[in-house]
Image: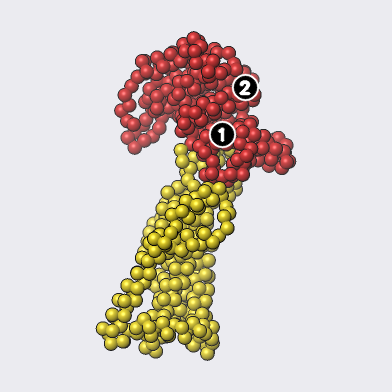
Amino acid sequence: MVSAVFHSPLDAAPRAEAPVRHLAKPVAGTPQAAVARPAKAAGFDGSELAQRVVPPVLGLLLLIGVWYLVSVSTGSSIPSPLDTGRQALQIFSDPFYRNGPNDQGVGWNVLMSLQRVAMGFGLAAAVGIPLGFLIGRFGFLSRMFNPLISLLRPVSPLAWLPIGLLVFKGANPAAIWTIFICSIWPMVINTAVGVQRVPQDYMNVARVLNLSEWKIVTKILFPAVLPYMLTGVRLAVGTAWLVIVAAEMLTGGVGIGFWVWDEWNNLNVTNIIVAIFVIGTVGLLLEMALIKLATAFTFEEVKS
Amino acid sequence: MNDAKYIDIQGVAQTFKTKKGLFPALRDIDLTIAKGEFVALIGHSGCGKSTLLNLIAGLTTPTDGVLLCAGREIAGPGPERAVVFQNHSLLPWLTCFENVYLGVERVFGAGAKSTGAKAETKAQLLERTHAALALVGLTHAAQKRPGEISGGMKQRVGIARALAMEPKVLLMDEPFGALDALTRAKLQDELLDIVARTQSTVVMVTHDVDEAVLLSDKIVMMTNGPAATIGEVLKVDLPRPRHRVALAEDPAYLHYRKAVIDFLYTRQAHVEKVA
């Protein structure tokens, strides 16, 4: 039930290289894993490798091919893959330079954006997860907050930016506020759903053992809800990373979103395309890290 | 305390509110269970066996009537009436040891203070947990998680968790229902052995005639629902210890078996309307 939540197209990407890593790793872990591995290794040959590697490579080639065609047909106003690659090499050769507040390396831009995401997201987690627990545990609070969540959740994150600017009187806190408000909902909702879906059997165990409320939370509720919570966290981080780019375009300063906008003002389209790849890669890495975290905390469901 | 009426159920009825209106599950249940007695509740599915067990456990409260245990009204669930759940209900994120320890700690550890008893030391608690796992023959699996062991082993951990709390009454809801016949027979034998040693009072829900006759002192046969009640109570007067192979041709055993089958399939035969 829970594992289905984590499925995403991205699963294919880590899997593509999984067999290679497994073979290199010394055999450790559970007996089942040890048994499963030889079976995997037996089926691991050239054709399997080709099946795993060829499709993603073809996909990338398709992207580059289309990009190249667009570049040619627009008379290079969209830079070609080759030009972009060269530019990227140059940018990444010195990612951490500083030539004043508006001219900093791509590394600083990414780090600044990540810092804002971390702050906004961290605050959202600190508020959202406990709130989700309360909403899930108490029907009264659930009925009280559900209309509010339904009302506020569909609001575009950027609509919150002016409110943030007004209240906090600064671009940076306003961007953090925007991240906060848009990444809190998936965490509240998923945590609440997780708490509501804790199997009745577990709660019956708690009642028969007469566990204290503290033990119920630490030994039953929290572990049972963790997979749901982590799904919420993953969705929230994804949203936060989407929003930060847009928010920084509006607020300025240092950050990957601002960098895109700055390069647009400089009409440096090559850098914009490099930035798009950087944003995509960072988003992918965040997602993959959280999927790894989530699978580590997903336990086999009880089968009757 | 009246040992002959250790558990005393008087005029209990249970009605559930459903979307289609009130559903009478049980009515007019009168039953007494003596201390150390092994009682099986048997009947067709949907006859309210589990409902009755949940009432004794205190997980639900009756619409009408009273249930007494050791002379006190059953007001809610508690470790003195331990339940072995049908689907074992082990917590998958804890090891077998931790699953058992959870209950032990509550009853004999820090949680014991609420009942006025003295809290035992950590070493004593660990010892109790080890002893319970040894009782069901699972010392080797103590550090495994439920996902890593077989269904029969999980059910044994469930039994160990219940027994470790030294309950006054052991309540079992079709504990072996999900197991294959061979594993079931093995666990039944183990249960016979354990109950003989601990002298526990046991109430077990089952739909297996042989299981009921083999294990019980008293078989409570229930009529079909809705509004099920006790149809007949059969005293099983077979000497203990009982051995399934020897009993297979025992005339008394066959007589009891026939009586239960007769009740279930002749007098209470019914085609289920709702599956």
Secondary element at image label 2: helix
The residue at 52%/59% (across/down) is A23
Alpha-carbon span between mark 1 and mark 2: 17 Å
In this rendered view, identify the residue nearer to me: B12 or B239. Answer: B239
Return the x and y of residue A286 as percentages of the image width and height: 48, 67
Return the x and y of residue B138 as percentages of the image width and height: 61, 36
Badge 1 vs badge 2, beta-carbon distance below 8 Å: no
Going by the numbered disc 2, the residue's amino acid type is Ala
| Residue at the spot of label 1 | B156
Label 2: chain letter: B
Q: What is the crowding at mark 1: few (fewer than 14 residues within 10 Å), some, or many (at least 20)?
A: many
In this rendered view, identify the residue nearer to me: A280 or B117. Answer: A280
Place residue B23 in its image quadrant: top left
In this picture, is A282 found above or below B160? below
The chain coloured red in the image = B
Going by the numbered disc 1, the residue's amino acid type is Arg
The residue at 37%/88% (across/down) is A267
Marker count (numbered): 2
Q: Is residue A248 left or right of residue B98?
A: left
Tag 2 or tag 1, which sits nearer the N-term?
Answer: 1
Return the x and y of residue B11 as percentages of the image width and height: 47, 21
Secondary element at image label 1: helix
Return the x and y of residue A170 as percentages of the image width and height: 49, 79
Query: Which color is chain A depicted in?
Result: yellow
Q: Is residue A116 left or right of residue B142?
A: left
The residue at 41%/80% (across/down) is A274
Q: Is residue B102 left or right of residue A145?
A: right
- Residue A153 shows in the view: no
The residue at 61%/33% (across/down) is B137
Label 1: chain letter: B
In this rendered view, identify the residue nearer to me: B111 or A220. Answer: A220
Considering every residue shown, the one lying at the far top of the view is: B251
